[in-house]
Amino acid sequence: MNLEGFFRLTRRAIPHLLDNGGGHIVNLTTSLVDHALSTVPSALASLTKGGLQSATKALAIEYADRGVRVNAVSPGIVKTPMHAPETHESLAGLHPVRRMGEISDIVDAVLYLENAPPI
């Protein structure tokens, strides 16, 4: 679903962005693509999110000179209902900064990219 949804949506969005003189696409991937952990099963996430990461790079280069920016945010482990509160301390220990990410961290990263001026 990660790749199919991205492909279908992006394929439809890019012509509209080009018609409007540019725009911005932000994908969400995972830091596990570049930093696998032996304690976190991540083959499927690496397969699908790694595809998003590679496509993001390719599209960023392909459309840069036409005013379309393409970026990705690659969070680590984030406090969501997916992780039981009793696991938060051990999960925080997996991060170099010794804390789990917050949903607001992801939102802030996306908003930063969205509001960044075109280069």
Image (cartoon, grey):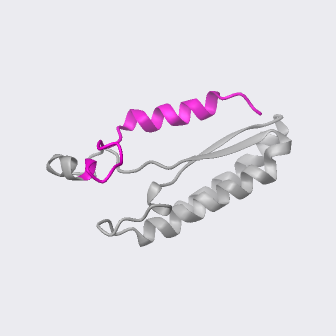
Above or below, 61 relative to 106: below
Residue 39 spot, x, y in % from top left: 29, 67
Residue 101 spot, x, y in % from top left: 35, 41
Left or right placement of residue 30 versus residue 50 in this view? left
Looking at this view, name the residue that lies furthest to the front: 96
The quadrant holding residue 19 is top right
Left or right placement of residue 113 versus residue 103 in this view? right
Looking at this view, name the residue that lies furthest to the left: 86
The quadrant holding residue 116 is top right
Using the rendered image of the protein, determine whether residue 68 is visible from the camera's viewpoint: yes
The magenta region covers 91-119
Depth check: give the residue in front, 12 or 96.
96
Question: Does the magenta portion include 111?
Answer: yes
Residue plotted at (45% across, 38% down): 106
Looking at this view, name the residue that lies furthest to the bottom: 43
Residue plotted at (77% across, 33% down): 119
Left or right placement of residue 110 versus residue 92 in this view? right
Residue plotted at (19% across, 47% down): 89
**What is the total number of numbered labels drawn onto the structure image?**
0
Above or below, 45 relative to 70: below
Residue 16 spot, x, y in % from top left: 77, 42
Using the rendered image of the protein, determine whether residue 1 is visible from the camera's viewpoint: no
The quadrant holding residue 7 is bottom right
Above or below, 102 relative to 63: above
Above or below, 31 relative to 16: below
Residue 88 spot, x, y in % from top left: 21, 47
Question: Does the magenta portion include 115?
Answer: yes
